[in-house]
Image (cartoon, grey):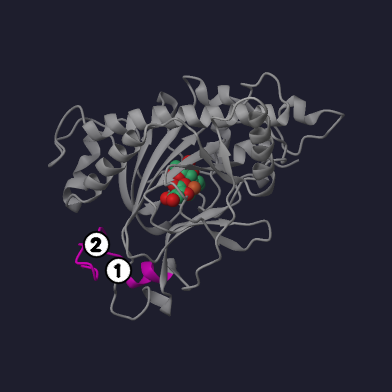
Amino acid sequence: MTNRHGFLTMVVLTKGDLDQIALPAAQPPAADVRAIDLSATGPARAAAARALVAACEEQGFFRVTGHGVPPGLVRAAEAAAARFFALPQTDKEASAGLRLGYASKRIGSGGDLGWIEYLLLSVTPAGAVPLASSASPLPCAPAAAATLATPSCPLRELLGEYSAAVRRVACGVLELMAEGLGVAPTDALARLVAREDSDSMLRVNHYPPRPDLGDGGGGGGGGQNLTGFGEHTDPQIISVLRSNGAPGLQISLRDHAWASVPHDGDGDSFFVNVGDTLQVLTNGRFRRVKHRVVVNSERSRVSMIFFGGPPLGERLAPLPALLADGGRSRYREFTWKEYKGSGCRGRLADDRLCRFEN
Ligand SMILES: C=C1C[C@]23C[C@@]1(O)CC[C@H]2[C@@]12CC[C@H](O)[C@@](C)(C(=O)O1)[C@H]2[C@@H]3C(=O)O
Ligand SMILES: O=C(O)CCC(=O)C(=O)O
Ligand SMILES: [Fe+2]
């Protein structure tokens, strides 16, 4: 099947599949996304820390500037990923030996579908344990992959370099957060992601333009949009996202209305979202953000997301400083391994945290 741009579609979706991912054509209003300058010093840093706390309390979503990641590294990683996705489908599917965790159409193992193909990689050894993933980032036996048949896999190396840089951004954000919250030591949050045994992952998503299925709409149901990545919250502490600027990401606001994430002015920011675990660590003061990707674009969207997670055995509970004055914990203590396991066979949109509420 080819779409109206002449691209070979990555997977053949049945009419039933398309019915499942069709969405109404409505384009929600733009979200007001706060910018936080990570390079601020002196009084400006204290102001940035306060703004960061406010953004996490109100929206669970913001963007960071002044992060220090070389634009050349970002462009190189994005371009290499785009080249990978442009390979013939058989080559992408044969890439298992390169440990890129390639998969398409299916997200997790609970039956979620999306107009998407992706790479899912562990950034740290602990990340090799997948979270209900259909694309196993587990090390696989070396295999001869058609076009990328090189034992060292330059794409994986580049993505490794990229994740190391973005992991530093995640830690910088978490330090500024601790400062803003008045939590000591200021690495109380960042150390969870900085530790060698942190369970962090990198995901590279590709959403091809919506195909023309000749029905005047977006597949079944007469919708004109397709779900790229269904609504969900990220289970980890924080996620740091960068995209090639093609639209599609939407966040859910406090009133549950969807809002589109506009392209950042200079194209150099990273978007950050609060995950389930940070909501727990802050005893609900920070709000995890529900988000999704909707495809209705002339352009392919490529996004790269670093998920900063704690070590598998880490016991998760609100930080004592945030429980001061006899405050009651809203969550019972659990380990990250337990949390990952509990979400395993569920659907993307499930509320995985409610099981741990007191
Ligand atoms: C249905 C699922 C896919 C997912 C694991 C889960 O059980 C629920 C959360 C999903 C998510 C969302 C953020 C990341 O993209 C991801 C890798 C993660 O850690 O949690 C995915 C998981 C996945 O695609 O396997
Ligand atoms: O691709 C995107 O822009 C967001 C995807 C996402 O939310 C995820 O991979 O968890
Ligand atoms: Fe997400």
Q: Going by the image, does 83 lie left or right of 29? A: left
Q: Position of residue 196 (x, y in %)?
A: 46, 19
Query: The disc labelled 2 sits on which kind of residue?
Result: Thr
Magenta part of the chain: 2-19
Q: Residue at x 51, y 31 (%)?
A: 170
Q: Position of residue 286 (x, y in %)?
A: 68, 41
Which secondary structure class fits the magenta region best? loop
Within the image, what quadrant is residue 41 found in?
Answer: top right
Query: The disc labelled 1 sits on which kind of residue?
Result: Pro
Residue 4 among those drawn in magenta: yes
Question: Residue 242 versus residue 20: which sits nearer the camera?
Answer: 242
Q: Going by the image, does 161 lie left or right of 176? A: left
Tell me the tag on residue 211.
Answer: 1
- Decide: is 154 above or below 103: above
Q: Earlier in the sequence, mark 2 or mark 1?
A: 2
- Decide: is 2 above or below 101: below
Q: What is the secondary structure assignment of the residue under circle 2?
A: loop
Residue placed under numbered mark 2 in the picture = 9
Q: What is the secondary structure assignment of the residue under circle 1?
A: loop
Q: Decide if residue 170 is in sight here.
A: yes
Q: Residue at x 44, y 26 (%)?
A: 126
Q: Are marks 2 and 1 in contact (CB under 8 Å)?
A: yes
Q: Residue at x 32, y 33 (%)?
A: 73
